[in-house]
């Protein structure tokens, strides 16, 4: 009977030992997963420039809103749906940048993951000849619009 108890205790101890050794590995795995989800700012020189026909240059557009989508694979590399004053502007992929030409004045810049899900917005006032910059940072399950 004592031998059976020693055997059972040995099995229990054996079960606990691998769990303790797995903790650092699980911590490392979680860190790698989270690091893989992080996005990084993109330098203007590295960003892929795209155009938004509805917000192209025109006589009425005397100021510019520049939006850059961070690089990375957060949100599965989802496109960020950009809206200006409630109007569709463009869908940006990671590492893309767009220049939106608007009239001077107050504007609402918003970013959504799909058509109905605005996740972040910012009010901005543009002045004649000025340029306002925003960055889209992707977090797991959401986008953040960050004024620059």
Image (cartoon, rainbow, N blue to C red):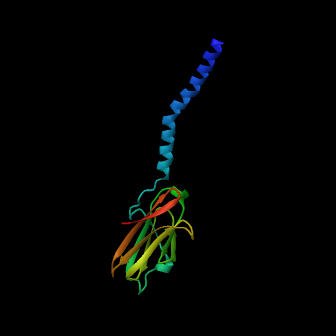
Question: Looking at the figure, which quarter contains the N terminus?
Answer: top right
Of residues 9 and 70, which is closer to you in this image? 9
Judge left or right: residue 82 versus residue 146.
right
Of residues 81 and 125, which is closer to you in this image? 125
| Residue at 40 percent of width and 68 percent of height | 134
Tell me residue 72's x, y (percent).
48, 56
Tell me residue 24's x, y (percent).
48, 35
Q: Is residue 14 above or below residue 48?
A: above
Q: Is residue 9 above or below residue 70?
A: above
| Residue at 37 percent of width and 79 percent of height | 63
Tell me residue 147's x, y (percent).
38, 67
Q: Is residue 33 above or below residue 115?
A: above
Most extreme residue toward the front is 1
Q: Quadrant of residue 101?
A: bottom left
Most extreme residue toward the top is 2
Judge left or right: residue 125 versus residue 73.
left
Question: Looking at the figure, which quarter contains the C terminus?
Answer: bottom left
Tell me residue 70's x, y (percent).
45, 61
| Residue at 56 percent of width and 28 percent of height | 16
Of residues 2 and 47, which is closer to you in this image? 2
- Count of numbered badges drawn on the protein: 0
């Amino acid at each position: 009977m004592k031998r059976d108890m020693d055997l059972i205790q040995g099995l229990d101890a054996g079960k606990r030992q691998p769990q303790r050794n797995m903790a650092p590995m699980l911590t490392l795995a979680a860190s790698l997963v989270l690091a893989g989800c992080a996005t990084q700012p993109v330098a203007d020189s590295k960003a892929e420039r795209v155009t938004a026909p509805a917000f192209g240059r025109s006589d009425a557009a005397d100021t510019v809103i520049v939006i850059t989508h961070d690089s990375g694979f957060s949100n599965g590399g989802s496109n960020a749906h950009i809206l200006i004053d409630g109007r569709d502007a463009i869908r940006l992929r990671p590492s893309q940048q767009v220049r939106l030409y608007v009239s001077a004045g107050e504007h609402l810049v918003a970013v959504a993951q799909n058509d109905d899900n605005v996740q972040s917005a910012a009010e901005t006032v543009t002045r004649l000849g000025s340029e306002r910059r925003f960055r889209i940072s992707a977090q797991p399950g959401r986008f953040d619009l960050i004024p620059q």
